Image (cartoon, rainbow, N blue to C red):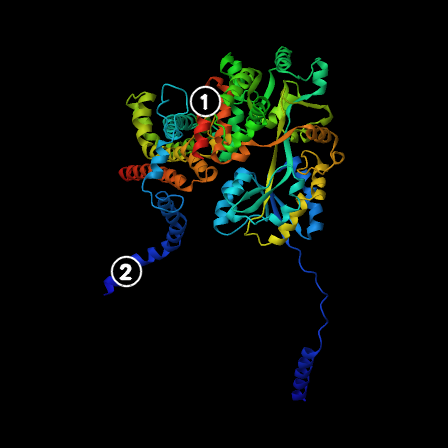
């Protein structure tokens, strides 16, 4: 009996193995997970996340966002790339840096070729490939002011140098004003933006391009004249460098009347409708900066990352970003209607500007950029050091 | 044979226990240090260039700018700035740390006060740099608020923005952050000095100052050598404070060696030159380390 029972159990066991198991429900292929690394945090990040949300559907991937400033990436990425690792699939970085490290970047020529004609700025190309593509733009249009402040004190935006000097004198005499213009200070870039605006307004857009290309020396008479005759005489109207976000509050509260900053300022003040902006008299160009997206060749999701970059620079992707405000589309075919009011006015004004120019220090990059920031900070508090500053800049430019 | 076996075991057991630590030291410290040393003698394309990278570093005005030193305001070069940092920071730290330890020795609840003072030491130095920047800020800074209160209006400005005060403000800020460390060590050292010494000295008629010079200072010599060595090492490797507060500026007036190494490596992408600075820094720290070990042996 016992033997029969054992045989029965064995037979059932064998038969159960032969029985056809129920087919598992067909599981969809797992979505790739992409990591995007960018420099934006706070309100700027909030404005970028909807773009990634929209991209998830288009690309068919889950997308994570990580914040790293370009300065930090510059120290992290070389070691990662040496180990054939990539901390992200799509990384926003300086164009000069990607060019210097082009051997680690995926060629984006196929993504870029169809869109290039619509873009205001050019892609970063090196080693015969498109190693990074420009994204949404920021522009540095000039000096911002509060319309209510100007109305209260019967002030008008200047259209000539004489009017500008008269305005600064008038503001300097107002009660409660520390200085007419507050100088923002980050690692040094707000001061470099002001300087570039002077170079373009007083030396012309070509001077900016020639300085980027290294065709004109920093010690050249034309350059020195912009500094000595235009910028330095106005430095007494500028405050000492103040941490740039703190400077926004001080300026907004009326301790200063003017603030030179990029258009991201519109997303950082309580009433963007109260903002007005004017360029230096005679300015025929404005600087437009952007962050460049590249794909490290060590990414495990190069195809999905390529689709994501294609979406980001597409008209749809760019419109999604433009709607959030704080940045302008890098494409010419994005209509002004998609922007929030403060950015719309700026986008329309930008369309009237004769030339949009690349950022000087971002284009040259390297240690020269750091020197440029540092030397200008020196100039701001020691205007007499002008020749020393220009000589240092030229000597560093030669050694780059 | 038995004796030899016992001797071998005597060596083998501790050696076996040290193997994991030795392995980690070899992989994480010795190997990278040797690689860095090797890199400092090579060009970007891997060719041997001898001392060229070192010559480049030392001839760079950002390292040594003796034409300006000491007649003009900084920049004087990172090497000089590091030396000034040590010359100012070390005596101030020792004096303040020892002074605070003595002041708080017999104060009730001094443990809480000591903990508060020590907080500066546990603050991440990146945060410390930001705090220093705000401490000396023209608008928000407490230092300038005190100066205005004291009627020194002319001195009230953003200290970190001016070449003549940027380095000084960083050094003073680092004294504030680091003195807690010296104070804690000196407090521990003071607690080991027997009270009998002071009582006997009092009976012999020694004044408090004489007691300080002839009892406290000699008894604290081992602690002082630790404080001095650690402070010099801290001064040599100072980076994060400067990076966040001034980025070495304005005009290079607060540049230090470690930051310069970072800029060579990660901004100029000249890793070989950065390795040369790293080697120079290592040599300096080695000198301090050897001096400290010798001093410790003498104390023993």
Q: Can residue A318 be seen in this view?
A: yes
Residue positioned 33% across, 28% down in the render: B216
Local crowd at mark 1 within 10 Å, few (<14), some, or many (≥20)? many
Residue positioned 66% across, 37% down in the render: A330
Q: Disc 1 marks which residue? A: B163
Between A92 and B231, the one nearer to me in the picture:
A92
The quarter of the picture where residue A277 lies is top right
Local crowd at mark 2 within 10 Å, few (<14), some, or many (≥20)? few
Between A140 and A267, the one nearer to me in the picture:
A140
In the rendered image, residue A200, in percent from the top left (x then y), is placed at 58, 25
Q: Disc 2 marks which residue? A: B8
The quarter of the picture where residue B269 lies is top left
Disc on the earlier residue, 1 or 2: 2
The C terminus of chain B lies in quadrant: top left
The chain to which mark 2 is attached is B
Label 2 secondary element: helix
The chain to which mark 1 is attached is B
Label 1 secondary element: loop
In the rendered image, residue A256, in percent from the top left (x then y), is placed at 63, 18
Residue positioned 46% across, 24% down in the render: A219
Between A219 and A235, the one nearer to me in the picture:
A219
């Amino acid at each position: 009996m016992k033997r029969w029972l054992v045989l029965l159990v064995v037979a059932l066991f064998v038969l159960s193995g032969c029985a056809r198991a129920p087919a598992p429900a067909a599981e969809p292929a797992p979505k790739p997970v992409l990591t995007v690394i960018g420099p934006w945090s706070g309100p700027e990040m909030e404005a970028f996340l909807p773009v990634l949300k929209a991209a998830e559907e288009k690309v068919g991937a889950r997308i994570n966002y990580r914040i790293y400033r370009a300065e930090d990436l510059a120290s992290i990425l070389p070691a990662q790339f040496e180990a054939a690792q990539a901390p992200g699939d799509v990384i926003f970085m300086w164009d000069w840096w990607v060019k210097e490290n082009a051997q680690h970047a995926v060629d984006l020529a196929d993504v870029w070729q169809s869109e290039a004609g619509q873009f205001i700025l050019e892609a970063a190309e090196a080693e015969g490939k498109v190693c990074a593509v420009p994204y949404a733009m920021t522009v540095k249009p000039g000096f911002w002011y509060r319309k209510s402040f100007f109305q209260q004190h019967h002030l008008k935006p200047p259209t000539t140098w004489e009017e500008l000097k008269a305005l600064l004198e008038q503001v300097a005499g107002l009660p409660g004003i520390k200085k007419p213009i507050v100088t923002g200070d980050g690692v040094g870039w707000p001061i470099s933006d002001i300087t570039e605006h002077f170079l373009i307004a007083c030396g012309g857009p070509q001077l900016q391009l020639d300085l980027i290309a290294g065709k004109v020396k920093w010690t050249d008479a034309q350059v020195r004249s912009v500094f000595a005759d235009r910028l330095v005489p106005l430095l007494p109207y500028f405050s000492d460098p103040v941490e740039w976000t703190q400077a926004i509050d001080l300026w907004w509260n009326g301790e200063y009347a003017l603030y030179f900053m990029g258009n991201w300022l519109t997303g950082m003040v309580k009433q963007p409708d109260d903002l007005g902006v004017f360029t230096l008299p005679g300015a025929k160009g404005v600087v437009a900066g952007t962050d460049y997206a590249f794909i490290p060749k060590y990414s495990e999701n190069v195809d999905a990352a390529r689709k994501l970059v294609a979406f980001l620079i597409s008209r749809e992707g760019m419109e999604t970003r433009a709607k959030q405000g704080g940045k302008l589309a890098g494409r010419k075919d994005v209509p002004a209607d998609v922007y929030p009011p403060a950015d719309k006015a700026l986008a329309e004004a930008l369309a009237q500007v004769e030339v949009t120019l690349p950022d000087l220090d971002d284009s040259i990059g390297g240690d020269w950029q750091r020197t440029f920031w540092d030397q200008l900070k020196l100039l701001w508090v020691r205007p007499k050091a002008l020749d020393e500053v220009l000589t240092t800049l030229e000597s560093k430019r030669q050694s780059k | 044979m038995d004796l030899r076996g016992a001797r071998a075991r005597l060596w083998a057991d501790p050696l076996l226990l040290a193997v994991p630590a030795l392995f980690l030291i070899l992989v994480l410290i010795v190997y990278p240090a040797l690689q860095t040393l090797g890199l400092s003698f090579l060009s970007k394309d891997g060719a041997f260039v001898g001392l060229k990278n070192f010559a480049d570093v030392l001839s760079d005005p950002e390292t040594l700018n003796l034409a300006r030193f000491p007649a003009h305001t900084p920049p004087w070069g990172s090497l000089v700035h590091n030396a000034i940092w040590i010359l100012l920071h070390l005596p101030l730290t020792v004096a303040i740390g020892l002074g605070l330890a003595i002041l708080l020795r017999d104060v009730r609840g001094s443990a809480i006060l000591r903990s508060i003072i020590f907080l500066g030491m546990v603050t991440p130095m990146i945060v410390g740099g930001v705090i220093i920047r705000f401490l000396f800020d023209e608008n928000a800074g407490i230092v300038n608020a005190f100066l205005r209160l004291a009627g020194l209006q002319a001195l009230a400005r953003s200290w970190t923005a001016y070449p003549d005060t940027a380095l000084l403000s960083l050094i003073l800020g680092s004294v504030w952050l680091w003195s807690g460390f010296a104070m804690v060590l000196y407090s521990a050292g003071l607690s080991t000095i027997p009270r009998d010494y002071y009582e006997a000295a009092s009976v012999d008629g020694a004044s408090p100052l004489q007691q300080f010079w002839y009892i406290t200072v000699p008894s604290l010599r081992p602690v002082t050598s630790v404080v001095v060595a650690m402070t010099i090492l801290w001064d040599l490797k100072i980076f994060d404070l400067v990076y966040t507060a001034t980025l070495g500026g304005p005009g290079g007036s607060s540049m230090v060696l470690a930051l310069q190494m970072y800029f060579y490596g990660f901004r100029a992408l000249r890793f070989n030159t950065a390795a040369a600075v790293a080697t120079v820094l290592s040599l300096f720290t080695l000198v301090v380390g050897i001096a400290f070990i010798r001093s410790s042996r003498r104390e023993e």
